Amino acid sequence: MELRHLRYFIALAGSLNFTRAAERVHVTQSTLSHQIRQLEEEVGQRLFERIGKRVVMTPAGESFVAYAARALKEVDMGLGELKRDTASMMGEVRVGTTHTFNLEFIPDCVARFLLQSPAVRIVIEELPADAIAAQLEGGKLDFGVAYRPAASSALQFEPWFNEELVLVVGEQHPLADRRRIRMIELHREPLVLLPPGFSTRRMLDECFAAAGAEPVVIAEMNSIAAMVGLAGRMQVGTIVVAGAAALNPALRVIPLENPTPMRTPGLLFNNAVPQSRASLAFAALLRREAMSRGTRPAQRPAARKRRSIAVAAPTAPTTPTPRGRARPAAR
């Protein structure tokens, strides 16, 4: 049973007319009838009877209506109190986030939250994942927005969804027109990647090893923006989430497979650090926004007309291609 069932029941009980009740709750008459039938199936009794063109309540409906009205009144009062609490919240919320989330997601959420709770001060620190974990353990952050930490971490991780990493190259790169690329095809390809100290780099190294590929890492940078910027300036690829390249139309996003590198973003908490009301409210907003956006397969931007430039054909890989593809974890 859901709240809408009770709202539809109260509307029909008040008018005893399906047309007027449907108008009151802003649904079609057929939708209202269907929802009332669902409620009756849930309670196991008929709540209304049709007698000719009239609608009358059954004894069970007469008995139930007072309880349903009281329940809805309590819920509506509680929702009103929550809205007042949100508007009156104060204090400071300190959040650590990795660069990827700080491009669009975090600013969008901060703006939305501050419109509702202008008295709260939000402090966002862009940090590597390991630094976020260290600051959480030290009690310097309320929570983090990052990727799943190592299994040995004592922090609580709340997963949101799985997201793919993609190959990003400039529009003049020899691979720019590819629709998909197997990891084995990156054997001996020049790449710019995160340093080995990053968990994402370690995960990519595992994917390369599983595929039998050894790319040529010509540069290591600890900034996603710098990696993407280098990929746009020379014929070198990088591997990041698709959103990191979204702001540069000259870049090409190419999905990877066999295996597909996957990461799991989410919230990171230290259970030993109590959360304020403002912190819990901001975390709830992040959770809702993340789950509503979810993750989508990487899409390659429409190819531009390329200038006529002679490029050397990529060397064909000789290592056997492994079969199978990494499957995303169950949501």
Image (spheres, helix red, strand yellow):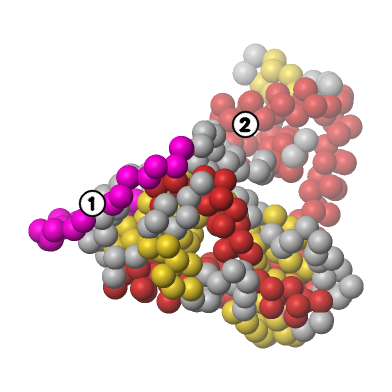
Asked whether, in this view, residue 157 is left or right of residue 237, the answer is right
Q: Position of residue 151 (x, y in %)?
A: 78, 58
Tell me the kind of residue under disc 1: Ala
Note whether residue 112 is visible.
Answer: no
Q: Secondary structure at mark 1?
A: loop
Tell me the kind of residue under disc 2: Leu
Return the residue found at the far top: 52
User: Which residue corresponds to mark 2?
Assistant: 32
Between residues 166 and 11, which one lies in front from this camera angle? 166
Question: Where 103 falls versus 18 (above or below)?
Answer: below
User: In the image, is residue 198 part of the stretch drawn in magenta?
Assistant: no
Q: Residue at x 69, y 78 (%)?
A: 131
Q: What secondary structure is the magenta-colored segment mainly?
A: loop
Q: Residue at x 81, y 45 (%)?
A: 69
Q: Position of residue 292 (x, y in %)?
A: 57, 53
Asked whether, in this view, residue 296 is left or right of residue 153, the answer is left
Q: Which residues are magenta?
A: 300-321
Return the residue found at the far front: 318
Crowdedness near tag 1: few (<14), some (14–19) or many (≥20) residues, C-alpha within 10 Å = few
User: Which residue corresponds to mark 1?
Assistant: 313
